[in-house]
Image: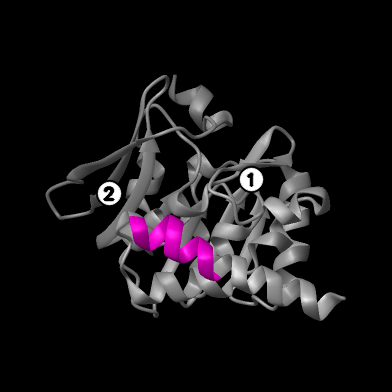
Amino acid sequence: MPGTDEALFAALRDRMVLEQIQARDVINPRVLAAMRTVPRHRFVPDRLRREAYDDNPLPIGEGQTISQPYIVALMSELLQLTGGERVLEVGNGSGYQAAVLAELAAEVYSVEILEPLARRATATLRELGYPGVVVRAGDGYLGWPEAAPFDAIIVTAAPDHIPQPLVDQLKIGGRLVIPVGEFYQELLQCVKTPQGLPCKNIIPVRFVPLTGDGVKNRR
């Protein structure tokens, strides 16, 4: 029965937050509420819905994955959103991280380089009622200049350096959360100042590489 399934998924979300997220010291109450609210099972293939709240990433097609719930929560917390921000997400994937961000910020602009994923995520987000999320297919290395500047930027694929277009599109005082590295990656939290972009290492991570013409041209 659909109602029974939804009750089960809600219980699984509660357990996910308690055992996977709070247990690892993500404490922001708005982030915890968002993780309890967004139906992660709607962003994975039907055959994997029962695994949606497990403590690991899952394949979503096109060689891509939906990140482990803890990583989604941690990156969201590191953005330090209070509710009125304009956020850029690079690497939309399934749309799940964008939905979490939509619970935390006013506007979310999300770029996905793989058009089939961008179309699928747009449909899922529309079905779930997230009008504050705008998704487009494109090269995330280049950001979204027409919608800039952004209060926060989150990158869910790993370049081997911080893309300068993203730095340029970030407001002074804005926060960038990004995995950086080729073979060994570190999750960075950066804050833009008039003097530069100081960054803090958070934890080692493993993300798919950031791709696109922007990366190739940089090399």
| Residue 138: image tag | 1
83 horizontally vs 212: left or right: left
Tell me how far mark 2 sits from mark 1, CA to CA. 24 Å
Provide residue 46's location: percent of width, then percent of height: 82, 54
Provide residue 34's location: percent of width, then percent of height: 49, 73
Q: Residue at x 53, y 72 (%)?
A: 36
193 horizontally vs 126: left or right: left
Q: Residue at x 42, y 19 (%)?
A: 183
Q: Residue at x 65, y 77 (%)?
A: 131
Quarter of the figure with the C terminus: top left
Q: For residue 28, which quarter of the picture? A: bottom left
Type of colouring: one colour
Report the residue marked by disc 2.
189
Q: Which residues are magenta?
A: 14-23
Q: Residue at x 73, y 63 (%)?
A: 42
Q: Is residue 22 magenta?
A: yes
Q: For residue 133, which quarter of the picture? A: bottom right
Q: How many neighbours does mark 2 have within 10 angstroms: few (below 14), some (14-19), or many (20 or more)? A: many
* Callout 2–callout 1 Cβ contact below 8 Å: no
Tell me the kind of residue under disc 2: Gln
Provide residue 123's location: percent of width, then percent of height: 78, 64
Q: Is residue 136 magenta?
A: no
Tell me the kind of residue under disc 1: Gly
